[in-house]
Image: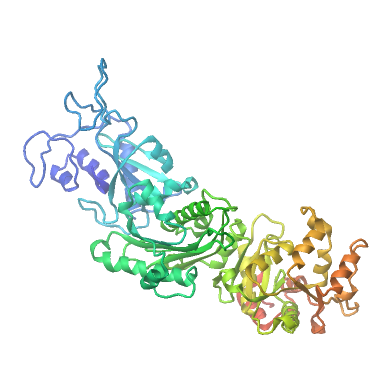
Amino acid sequence: MRNAGVARAQVAAERQEHPAALVELGVTVQRVGGQVEGGPVIKTFKQPNDPDYEAKKNRVLELYDIANAKSTPGKRDPNVVICMHVFGPLTLFPGRGKRGPGRVPPRRGCRHRPGASGGRPRHAPRAFATSFETRRPPCKAGPAGPPWLRTITVRWSARVSSRLRVRKVAAITGGAVAIVQSVHMSDRVTDTHQKALQINLDPRWYGTVAEIGAGQEVVRWFFQVGGAAGTIAKSISAYDMAVSDAVYGSADRYVSRSRLQAMLDHEFELNVERLQDARGDTTSFFAFADTVVARSYQGGNECHGWMGVKFQSRPRDEPSQIVLHVRMLDAEASIQQEALGIVGVNVLHGAFFQHHEPARLVESLLDQLTVGRIEIDMIEFQGIEFRSVDNRLMALQLVQLGLSGAAMFSADREVLQPSEVLRKKAIMVERGSFRPTTVVNIDMLECALAKFANDPGMADVEIIPLMELTMSNLLAGGADVDRRDFLARADLLAACGMTVLISDFFEFYRLAAYLAAMTSERIGIAMGIPTLIDLFDERYYLQLPGGILESFGRMFKNDLKLYVYPLRKTEADQLRTVDDVVVSVELQPLFDYLNRRGSFVALDNYRSEYLHIFSRDVLHLIGTRDDTWVSMVPPAVAELIKRRSFFGYTRAE
């Protein structure tokens, strides 16, 4: 019995068709004597004695039809079918003197003959045929089965079976054994050893692993679990800069995205060039690369790196790509290397087996790790397999899962790596709901940038403006983020040409600490009067041993300044500026001290006609179809809200 011919062989055997049909399918049932044209001798067939044989046989045939796209799977049918085939019935025992080499002889005085497994408990050899999707195009199965279905031999045991987490849905059918199993994604593999072994045992994937810095920890997993010869075509580690330049071309920075991309492109193209003719019809090629710097002997350096995989999801398909930036947080270099190897295996396993579910792929990146060991602050999906993926949602998920404290993306929807964008640049950030973006939001940022640029210490320094959305604002008291609402806000900010920062830093001192780690230049935060007053609410700092004093010490230690926009809710109200703010009696001296030292900068270059505009009022007007909201937002924002019906907008009759 072999591969896709299993069910067809059973039908042929039951109908007593010409034995040559079974020979053509590569099935030998029972050899008695005589000759059959074009194959071995077959005369008799073992008749099934299972009363449920017909039902089981029909279910197997249904599953094969689903796998070959001949029928549509129902609600209870599996999306993936795995076929397994047992080498010989385990009830057959070898006779005396016929034990194979290496078999364990019977114990003295034991009258029982050794089993077919040769005394190795639970280690009967079996063949495992790789999984295939139900939506594969139908192919004609010849003697070796469909071209995308290959058989490999493994030492199967109860331990391995439980680790693969598969559930039996159909079993023995007559004289031959056909086990059809269903994979459930809720029982996904999480162990690193399992993942590396699953990749090695799958004959579809073949490629290169190139690593620079922090050892060769990723490829080590594949060599360690065994079977790497079927997966790893080449492993390379070009540590020397001259050697690295000779292979991948020169680079200004060796731990950078540009170096990683050069590695991925070079190794993938080499695989296709060298191996396409020989195995391109049955193999999906890949190239994995990382360039990292772990903790040095002296210590004190930034421990981070770039990692990615470029792969074909199907033979001769266009390549797809996953790129991410990682930070190693462990205190010792050896432990950082271990964590890096685990992340690399997670990336490869996710690319091969979860590329159709990018959200689950991102979730799996920290399998066998914790957020205290690895931080992933940027991930980008590209290529044909990810053509429908919005990388901004993936950036949001990184922050949601705690993989990173913040993520960034530009106005053209490109995800950014914060340290590369903010390095050696001054930063001006404005926090808000931006639901929707109003003219006040834009005016506040522009006024703050003008004041910021006029500071004597800002001569010849590039300033990066950021609009910040916090997770607390996006969640709005709920359990999950409304993704449509998030994308609407992101698109409106993009229409204004803004770079967006998503952060999990509700407290401003945490935001200040994060930005200070990204740059050595000055930092400014633009805010309104209500937000400044909230800063002096001691409830927000109960978790700190030093309370509000500790939070302000952290926030203002790098000469950070707050640029405060005035407030006037209605035309009849009096204008309130930073000099008019009153806080609690015990904290007023602290407020006055910070104001005198220049930590607060009053924005007096505002446009007075904008002061009465608030996002919540604009949102209400949109819902009531009152078109006066149009003048309260930038023209690009108004056009996009109308065109895409954001925030429940409907055109008035």
Q: Is residue 571 above or below residue 71?
A: below
Coloring scheme used = rainbow
Horizontal relation, residue 470 to residue 546: left or right? left
Seen from this angle, which residue lies furthest front?
298
Seen from this angle, which residue lies furthest left?
34
Q: Residue at x 45, y 46 (%)?
A: 184
In front: 43, or 651? 43
In this orientation, does residue 353 appear? Answer: no
Where's residue 537, x and y in %? Answer: 84, 60
Where's residue 319, x and y in %? Answer: 38, 67
Seen from this angle, which residue lies furthest right?
585
Horizontal relation, residue 633 to residue 315: left or right? right
- Circle count: 0
Where's residue 627, x and y in %? Answer: 73, 79
Where's residue 3, x and y in %? Answer: 26, 47
Q: Residue at x 91, y 66 (%)?
A: 589
Q: Is residue 242 above or below residue 48?
A: below
In this orientation, does residue 571 appear? Answer: yes
Horizontal relation, residue 247 to residue 25: left or right? right
Quadrant of the rendered structure where residue 604 is?
Answer: bottom right
In the rendered image, the quadrant that contains the N terminus is top left
Horizontal relation, residue 180 to residue 35: left or right? right
In front: 209, or 650? 209
In the rendered image, the quadrant that contains the C terminus is bottom right
In front: 335, or 135? 335
Quadrant of the rendered structure where residue 392 is?
Answer: bottom right
